[in-house]
Every structure is written in C-alpha cells, then in structure tokens.
Amino acid sequence: MPFSEFDLIDTYFSGLTDKRGDVMLGIGDDAAVLQPPEGQELVVTTDTLVSGRHFSPDVDPERLGHKVLAVNLSDLASMGAEPAWATLALTLPQVDEAWLQSFSRGFASLARKHGVQLVGGDTTRGPLSISIQLMGFVPSGEAMRRAGAQAGDLIYVTGTVGDAGLALKGVSSGVHPAAASELQKRLECPTPRVEEGKSLRHHANAAIDISDGLVADLQHICDASGVGAILNYVDIPLSPPLEIYLNEGGDWRLPLSAGDDYELCLTVSPDKADIVERIADDFDCDFTRIGVITPSMGMNILMKDGRTEHGPVPGYDHFADE
Ligand code: ADP
Ligand code: MG
C-alpha cells in the first residue's frame, strides 16, 4: 500500500515532540488550539529554508531538522521570548523515509531542549523547502526590540562571528580538520541563544540576531533607533580558525559581513554593563563588548592600524544578486 500523506504525518510528526499543558488541541484537526499564559504577549516568527538557496540538497537531514528550528528559535531569542509552539510546512519532492526519519530526529531533539511542541503543519509535494512558524511568550511590554538603542549604549555580541561564513567559503590551509568540522557544525547546526536572550531581556535596550552579518544586522538596530555606531575591529570575537584565516591574508570583511552565525547583538546602557557581564558567567558563550552607539547616524569601524572604515559592509541580501 502506498505511503499516504496522512501516514507520513502520523509516522513522523504526530507524536514527535513532548506534550505541553497549554496545547488544547495539537496535530490532527483542522487547526491547533493553544492557550497563551495570562499576562504575556504572544511572539511569532517564521523562517523558510529552500534547497539550493539556504542549504545544499545533500546536507545531513538531521542537521537540517535542527537548523530550520534553530533559525526560528534565534528570532525569538533576540526578542527575549520563551519558545512554546511550532508549526511545520514541509514541501518534499518525494517520500524518502530515511530522510524523514533523520530530519524529524534533528528537529525533535532541539525542540525537546527548548520545550517546543509541534502543534501542526502542512505537507505538500514539490521542490524541497521547509518553513517553520514558531510562537513563544514574553511578559507584556518586555520584548527586546531593534528600536531601543540609545547614544552611549555599549554594543555586545554573543559567541564568535564569521564562523558560518568561513565554513561556506572553505577553510584555510592552517586549520586542523577537527576545527574545520567544528566550523561546518556552526554553519549547519547553529546554537540559538535562547536562554541568553531571556536573561538579557531586562538589561538590553535593543537586540537583533545575526543572520545576515554583524554590520548589516547592527545597521538594522541603528536604522530603527535613529542612531549610529562605532565598532572596534580588534574587539570582534573570533574563533581560532577565523584568526588563522585572517592571519593568512583572508578578507578582513568576513567577520563583519558573513551571515548565518545566529549570535545575538545587543546594545546596553553603560550602567548595566556590569550586570550584563555578570550574566555572561552563567553561559558557555562569551558576551563581548565591541563598540558604542553614537548620536549621529552612520557606521564607523576602527581598524587595528588606526584607519576608519565606513559602513555599509554588505550583508546577505536574497535579492541583491538577481
Ligand atoms: P487540512 O487539509 O485540514 O489543512 P492536513 O491534512 O494538511 O489538514 O493536515 C492534517 C493535520 O496534520 C493537521 O492537524 C495539520 O496541522 C497536521 N500536519 C500536516 N502536515 C504536518 C507536518 N509536516 N508537521 C506537523 N503537522 C502536520
Ligand atoms: Mg482542514
């Protein structure tokens, strides 16, 4: 008997994630029925990954299942929200059970880590493409926005930047194979900074996640807030392979322009710097101070040799090359 759409949903998605008490009705009806907590606002995001555009068709499906949820979790992280529910719209060229098994495993293990229940979706046939809508909560009025940066704020970034970009480019000659595989993991299996975002909610004036590139995403904060920024290039946190790449004469713009890192970039009033740096002690990833917000618009990047480079440094733009 052929494997129907309903068999596919039943087998791979119906019981995939842990049940939450606030899901009145999950997969199996025409729509899900969900109970948001009192006093909280609903925070909603969607991201799509398209084969050939965002990932190569032969990428490990388990990593793909992780990544498509991770990029959505990262959007909630930058709002300081707590993730709760997801829907999954899956367009598949054919039913490949081994692929579905791995994909759903990657998705489920990250969902479990963050208490996310898959509550519905859609399954169709066509060129491989995956969309997730992720919903979460934030106490009313507390979401971190792009539009809160103030002149004098310190600019922080979590983790290291440029790693996914370097993985895409191909690693440089001095990089150990183990480090190269770490870089590949940064590209294919990003770690969304969900807990970091929640902890910083009360202390940051503005936040964004770095999906298009540090400068391009910081520029979004500046545009929304009507301010500018000075970045100290030497303070930008880099992984050892990226240091090697730059020391070998690699493109200095890579850490500024590479996307897909899914770190958070935040602006923090100087009187909150101590508390933010103390919060960082609770996490594996560093929070690094990389610059300051200025009253006048424009992006200035102070280089090691005293030169100033001016933004914009191009970030990733889906329509720029078409
Ligand atoms: P309808 O035709 O009423 O839109 P579907 O037949 O598309 O419903 O889906 C049946 C049920 O399975 C719905 O509850 C839907 O949310 C869920 N569903 C469909 N595809 C997926 C998927 N890929 N992941 C999770 N749930 C899904
Ligand atoms: Mg229906």
Image (cartoon, helix red, strand yellow):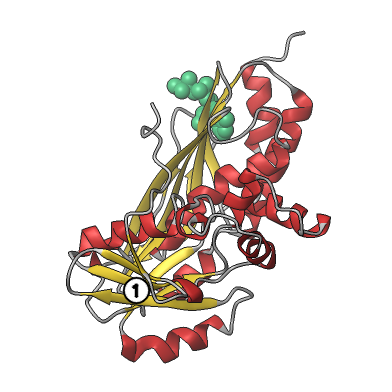
Question: Which of 147/25 is in front?
Answer: 147
At 46% across and 51% down in the image, what residue appears?
Answer: 211
Q: Quadrant of the N terminus?
A: top right
Q: Quadrant of the C terminus?
A: top left
Q: Is residue 166 visible?
A: yes
At 76% across and 58% down in the image, what residue appears?
Answer: 175
Question: Which of 123/7 is in front?
Answer: 123
| Residue 289: quadrant of the picture | bottom left
- The kind of secondary structure element at disc 1 is strand
Disc 1 marks which residue? 267
Vertical placement of residue 317 versus 235, above or below: above
Question: Which of 124/283 is in front?
Answer: 283
Q: Residue 135 in the image: state x and y as whole percent.
A: 43, 50
At 74% across and 29% down in the image, what residue appears?
Answer: 99
Question: Which of 88/71 is in front?
Answer: 71
Amino acid at pointer 1:
Thr
Q: Residue 286 in the image: state x and y as whole percent.
A: 57, 76
Determine whether, in the image, residue 161 is placed left or right of residue 232.
right
| Residue 40: quadrant of the picture | bottom left
Q: Residues within 10 Å of mark 1 (few under 14, many from 20)?
A: many
Q: Is residue 17 visible?
A: no
Vertical placement of residue 27 versus 152, above or below: above
At 35% across and 61% down in the image, what residue appears?
Answer: 218
Determine whether, in the image, residue 204 is placed left or right of residue 94.
left
| Residue 308: quadrant of the picture | bottom left
Q: Residue 188 in the image: state x and y as whole percent.
A: 65, 46
Vertical placement of residue 299 versus 74, above or below: below
Vertical placement of residue 32 versus 273, above or below: above
